[in-house]
């Protein structure tokens, strides 16, 4: 009996450690979001990029702890610490930490789209609403406490439940499609489009942009592999599929983007975003194909968004996270099939339905929040503040203070 108790305790401790390490890896990805934005925006907005990501993370932590996680999973932490620890060594707490990292991706994704001209506090407020309410509601429908009835509908219409192993749709598609109305309502940066003609804004720092991509890519293996939830469910297939999708994205971007370093480093992320949903059911060559297609979608989607639609989405978060996240959900229903080497048990119809539902939910949530904020407190910096840069206007210091003094 004592041996059994010891083994149970060890298993609980191992699962807590496993998920905590995954949480730390995904937490590190937020540094990747920060440096990807820092390298893309102009020097006068680099401090703002860093502060936004850290502030959004901190606010997301509080609102997801108090509101979001209880909405998604029906678990409240408003109880004595001894009860929170319990017999499982506090597994629910590290589960919260791990899933918080997903929820906090939503404002981090939006940040890249609205960069260089958004007011600070209205966006912090919007991020809190999305991380604390909107995202957890959708999370509860697919992964959480309210999933049974919706998954039953998917199974009825498609023959299988909607499958999103690590969040192509639930995290990335939701974040990218939420960002789209925000970008459109804000409007383009000053001078980006003049009399219908595009005037591209050069990125400020390729090494920082590249660093952001590398940090994200490394942390992504925690994002995908640790989505198993506990040690006994860990999958080597998820790890290798993530790797293959990433390199597929890089190689395809190298060709489609004609050696452009911005496309190459975002191509790695495109592949990783797309493979999240089906990383546990695809063959590695299927994952490679999914990553290649995702990268091509980003290269041409970014150009279409920026030049044809003239939407000033600074980091291209709508095509990268929104459109490719949707592709990832649909791709799981294609490359997860047994005739393409997948594990099976997935339905193209269910995947399409779930992916479209996420788009509708995200657009509706975003339009409501940003329309209200825009009509009340306003969401865009004044022309003078935008011209001076968010660093000086909001934070009263630039990224390189010595240069400013000189």
Image (cartoon, grey):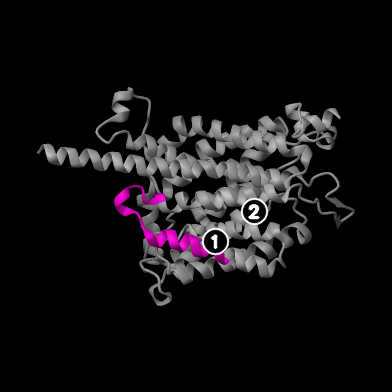
**10 Å neighbourhood of mark 1: few (<14), some, or many (≥20)?**
many
Which element type, helix, strand or loop, lies under badge 1?
Answer: helix
Please check the rendered image and state whether residue 1 is part of the magenta-colored stretch, yes or no: no
Check the image and report above or below for 119 versus 227.
above
Q: Nearer the viewer, residue 127 or 262?
A: 262
Q: Which residues are magenta?
A: 226-248
**10 Å neighbourhood of mark 2: few (<14), some, or many (≥20)?**
many
Asked whether, in this view, residue 369 is left or right of residue 349, the answer is: right
State the residue position of label 2: 318
Report the residue that reaches farthest toward the left: 1
Which element type, helix, strand or loop, lies under badge 2?
Answer: helix
Q: Residue at x 42, y 48 (%)?
A: 141
- Relative image position of residue 397 (x, y in whole percent): 76, 28
Q: Residue at x 40, y 70 (%)?
A: 342
Query: Looking at the rendering, in which quadrant would you find the C terminus?
Result: top right
Residue 290: give its label.
none
Q: Quadrant of residue 198?
A: bottom right
């Amino acid at each position: 009996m004592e041996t059994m108790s010891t083994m149970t305790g060890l298993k609980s401790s191992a699962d807590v450690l496993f998920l905590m390490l995954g949480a730390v890896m995904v937490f590190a990805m937020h540094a990747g979001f920060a440096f990807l934005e820092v390298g893309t925006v102009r020097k006068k907005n680099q401090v703002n990029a860093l502060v936004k990501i850290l502030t959004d993370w901190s606010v997301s932590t509080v609102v997801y702890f108090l509101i979001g996680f209880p909405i998604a999973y029906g678990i409240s932490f408003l109880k004595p610490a001894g009860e929170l620890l319990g017999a499982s060594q506090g597994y629910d707490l590290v589960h919260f930490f791990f899933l918080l990292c997903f929820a906090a991706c939503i404002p981090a994704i939006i940040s890249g789209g609205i960069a260089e001209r958004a007011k600070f506090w209205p966006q912090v407020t919007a991020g809190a609403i999305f991380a604390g309410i909107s995202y957890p509601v959708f999370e509860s429908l697919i992964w959480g406490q309210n999933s049974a009835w919706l998954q039953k509908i998917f199974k009825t219409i498609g023959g299988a439940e909607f499958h999103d192993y690590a969040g192509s749709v639930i995290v990335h598609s939701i974040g990218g499609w939420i960002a789209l109305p925000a970008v459109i309502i804000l409007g383009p940066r000053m001078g980006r489009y003049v009399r219908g003609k595009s005037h591209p804004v050069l990125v400020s720092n390729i090494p920082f942009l590249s660093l952001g991509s590398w940090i994200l890519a490394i942390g992504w293996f925690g994002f995908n592999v640790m989505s198993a939830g506990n040690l006994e469910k860990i999958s080597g297939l998820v790890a290798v599929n993530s790797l293959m999708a990433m390199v597929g994205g890089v190689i395809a971007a190298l060709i489609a983007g004609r050696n452009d370093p911005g496309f190459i480093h975002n191509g790695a992320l495109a592949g990783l975003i797309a493979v999240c949903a089906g990383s546990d059911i695809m063959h590695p060559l299927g994952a490679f194909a999914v990553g290649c297609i995702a990268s091509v979608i980003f290269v041409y989607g970014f150009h279409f968004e920026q030049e044809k639609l003239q939407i000033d989405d600074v980091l291209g978060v709508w095509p990268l996270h929104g459109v490719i996240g949707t592709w990832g959900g649909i791709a799981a229903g294609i490359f997860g099939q047994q005739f393409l080497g997948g594990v099976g048990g997935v339905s193209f119809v269910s995947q399409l339905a779930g992916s479209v539902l996420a788009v509708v939910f995200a657009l509706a949530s975003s339009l409501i929040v940003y329309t209200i904020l825009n009509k009340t407190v306003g969401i865009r910096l004044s022309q003078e503040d935008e011209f001076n840069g968010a660093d000086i206007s909001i934070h009263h210091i630039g990224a390189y203070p010595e240069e400013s003094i000189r």
